[in-house]
């Protein structure tokens, strides 16, 4: 009798373990979106690093959105250099992959770096949903640096991207007023407002000349946030975004523009950020995302 009870107990425990594993799998599946992750490729530089490599996936995960992001990075890379790299199939990029991984019930963002790759090679890796491109910050307000390079880059990318892929233009921001970037004085008279006006003009022209599927108004969001209680404090060195408010704001903006999911009320925030700062950055990102091209004014 005791032996039968022992066997029964072992069977019950085994069944309980199986049920626990099954429940865990269900919880994991429910934590993910019902479809596959949104797969994004950035053809960028350090300003795309600011946008996608730190805060975007944590914000997206907290809002119930699954994303996988690849950032093709060369520091300070201009449209001209991107176009020439594509033309020559130059393996000069560092590709940074950000994706969510699981360990039991807990998830974390995994970052994988693959060096010495080309745009064509990386484009062949994935079934991209979104591809973004941008101008280097020091040329962002200099229209003469955009063409013919932007047209060449767009044509090359469209030739190789899947039919469903959407191409987005990413607007970067004017430097902080106290920035010491070597291009700030010669290109923009050391004047943030002047630089911003030139960037706005160039972005209007880009959107007029090219049929992008979407527009990420990063520069408009940063400028709008500077007019709040946050002030002109969103850059850590005068031009790259701060690790707290700056990158968090940009992550909220990218989430809203790419997915249509509101960042308002997102409970996640990075260490060192206050609840008030979280609220302000979410509100600015939401407002600018809703405005879209209208954020550039008339």
Image (tube, grey):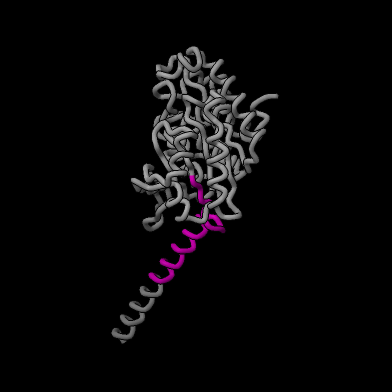
What residue is drawn where x is 60% and y is 44%?
261
Using the image, determine if residue 197 lies above or below residue 1. above
Residue 15, by quadrant, is bottom left
Which of the pair 127/209 is nearer the observer? 209
Give percent across and percent down for residue 245.
47, 29
Q: Quadrant of the N terminus?
A: bottom left
Give percent across and percent down for residue 58.
46, 43
Q: Is residue 253 left or right of residue 95?
A: right
User: Does the stretch in magenta take in 133?
Assistant: no
Using the image, determine if residue 148 lies above or below residue 183. below
Query: Which residue is farthest left?
Result: 3
Q: For the stretch drawn in magenta, what is the main secondary structure?
A: helix
Which of the pair 51/191 is nearer the observer? 191
Res 41 seen here: yes
Q: Is residue 178 left or right of residue 287?
A: left
User: Does the stretch in magenta take in 23?
Assistant: yes
What residue is drawn where x is 44% and y is 14%?
178
What residue is drawn where x is 57% and y is 24%?
199
Give percent across and percent down for residue 244.
43, 30
Query: Which residue is farthest bottom?
Result: 1
Which of the pair 170/163 is nearer the observer? 163
Q: Quadrant of the C terminus?
A: top right
Res 292 seen here: no
Q: The magenta stretch spans which residues?
A: 17-41
Q: How many marks?
A: 0
Residue 259, by quadrant, is top right
Give percent across and percent down for residue 254.
54, 39
Which of the pair 12/72 is nearer the observer? 72
Query: Which residue is farthest right?
Result: 298
């Amino acid at each position: 009798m005791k032996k039968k009870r022992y066997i029964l107990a072992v069977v019950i425990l085994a069944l309980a373990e199986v049920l626990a594993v099954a429940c865990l799998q269900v919880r994991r599946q429910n934590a993910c979106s019902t479809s596959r992750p949104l797969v994004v490729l950035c053809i960028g530089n350090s300003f795309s690093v600011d946008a996608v490599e730190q805060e975007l996936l944590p914000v997206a995960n907290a809002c119930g959105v699954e994303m996988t992001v690849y950032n093709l990075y060369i520091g300070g890379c201009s449209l001209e250099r991107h176009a020439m790299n594509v033309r020559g199939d130059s393996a000069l990029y560092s590709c940074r992959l950000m994706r969510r991984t699981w360990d039991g019930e807990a998830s974390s963002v995994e970052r994988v770096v693959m060096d010495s790759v080309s745009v064509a090679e990386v484009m062949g890796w994935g079934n991209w949903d979104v591809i973004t491109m941008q101008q280097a910050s020091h040329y962002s307000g200099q229209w003469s640096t955009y063409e013919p390079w932007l047209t060449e880059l767009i044509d090359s990318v469209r030739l190789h991207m899947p039919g469903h892929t959407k191409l987005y233009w990413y607007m970067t921001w004017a430097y902080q007023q106290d920035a010491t970037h070597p291009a700030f004085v010669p290109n923009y008279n050391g004047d943030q407002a002047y630089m911003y006006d030139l960037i706005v003009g160039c972005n209007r022209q880009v959107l007029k000349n090219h049929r992008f599927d979407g527009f990420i108004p990063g520069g408009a969001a940063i400028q709008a946030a500077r007019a709040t209680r946050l002030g002109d404090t969103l850059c850590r060195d005068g031009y790259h975004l701060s690790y707290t408010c700056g990158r968090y704001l940009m992550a909220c903006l990218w989430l809203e523009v790419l997915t249509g999911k509101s960042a308002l009320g997102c409970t996640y925030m990075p260490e060192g950020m206050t609840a008030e700062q979280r609220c302000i950055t979410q509100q600015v990102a939401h407002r600018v995302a809703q405005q879209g091209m209208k954020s550039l004014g008339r």
